[in-house]
Image (spheres, rainbow, N blue to C red):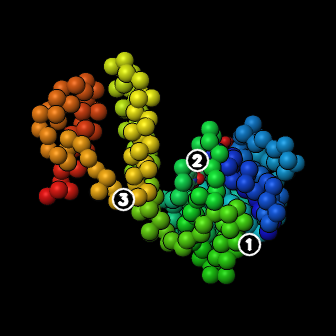
Amino acid sequence: MKVILLGAGKLGKQLYKSFVNNQTIDLIQWYNRSETNLISPEGIALTNSLDAIEKADLYILAVSDDVISSISKKLPTDVLLIHTAGSVSIDVIKSHKRRGVWYPIQSFNDQQEIDFSEVTFGIETNKLSDKQLIYDLTKSIEAKPIDINSEQREKLHLAAVIVNNFINHLFTQASLFCEDNELSFDLLRPLIRETFNKIDKISPEEAQSGPAIRNDKNTLKRHLELIKNPVLKKVYTTLTTSIQKLLT
Ligand SMILES: NC(=O)c1ccc[n+]([C@@H]2O[C@H](COP(=O)([O-])OP(=O)(O)OC[C@H]3O[C@@H](n4cnc5c(N)ncnc54)[C@H](OP(=O)(O)O)[C@@H]3O)[C@@H](O)[C@H]2O)c1
């Protein structure tokens, strides 16, 4: 299958790496607005011009959510076009009769290479006949495909934001708190690892421990006294209330 990848951000770069030496996927071109982000020692044609986009079987948009629609309108319309966003409806690219979504339920960054065999892709196509092609694409990078429509995908993306972005933000807040109090964040790493290991074995509700669920009032009061940052104080209070509400 002849494929053109558009986007060289966090997701685009990782897709590029998994496509480039793939036996099934014939990556014929890689587009990105800024040419400097396109690194191609493998001899794939590169372009930063949408006018220079070639003919292919499949076009994959791995660009910022807000530009999916505008970029789609500059591409040939008689081709299969898919985007990769969790919260963007399939109909945002409705200028394309053959359209789809290929949403990886994973977080990508430039520092760590993702093992796609651990990634599930939520798939939606408006034509049944195109679904198999996207399933084949998914399997060719050893990832897992599942069917999910735009409505459910949007909700899944919201849950993904909570488990990934919010938890990561809590790590950041804890790290800043440690720094302010001359403590090493490294002391918490085994606890963080154990927190994630547990989630593979038991439900999140069963894994919960700590002063909020025990309703240790003195400890909760003392913690709030120790927090100087008003935003963190609010986060602490909101999460404590949320944990305790599940008990009632
Ligand atoms: N990262 C993740 O963890 C993740 C997970 C699942 C799904 N996704 C989806 O994957 C897509 C890409 O996300 P990302 O995290 O890779 O984003 P990113 O790292 O912020 O990269 C954004 C990409 O969009 C391009 N872009 C932005 N504005 C543009 C414009 N006006 N014209 C042309 N190109 C433009 C950027 O080009 P320049 O390099 O020129 O700025 C870059 O290639 C999004 O739809 C996102 O929802 C991401």
Q: Residue furthest bottom?
A: 129
- What amino acid is found at the position of numbered circle 3 in the picture? Ile
- What amino acid is found at the position of numbered circle 1 in the picture? Asp
Query: Which quadrant holds the N terminus?
Result: bottom right
> Which comes before the other along the chain, label 1 or label 2?
1
Q: Label 3: few (<14), some or many (≥20) within 10 Å?
A: few
Residue 107 is situated, as x and y percent measured from the top left of the image, at 54, 49
> Which comes before the other along the chain, label 3 or label 2?
2
Residue 151 is situated, as x and y percent measured from the top left of the image, at 44, 69
The residues bearing labels 1 and 3 have C-alpha atoms spaced at a distance of 48 Å
Judging by the rendered image, the residue that carries numbered circle 2 is: 108
Q: Label 1: few (<14), some or many (≥20) within 10 Å?
A: few
Residue 229 can be seen in this image: yes
Q: Secondary structure at mark 3?
A: loop
Which marked residue is nearer to the observer: mark 1 or mark 2?
2
Between 33 and 216, which is closer to the camera in this rendering? Answer: 216
Q: Residue furthest right?
A: 43
Between 67 and 221, which is closer to the camera in this rendering? Answer: 221
Between 222 and 12, which is closer to the camera in this rendering? Answer: 222
Measuring 49% from the left and 68% from the top, which residue is drawn there?
150
Query: Which quadrant holds the C terminus?
Result: bottom left
Judging by the rendered image, the residue that carries numbered circle 3 is: 202
Judging by the rendered image, the residue that carries numbered circle 1 is: 78
Label 2 CB sits under 8 Å from any ligand 1 atom: yes
Q: Quadrant of residue 194?
A: top left
Q: Secondary structure at mark 2?
A: loop
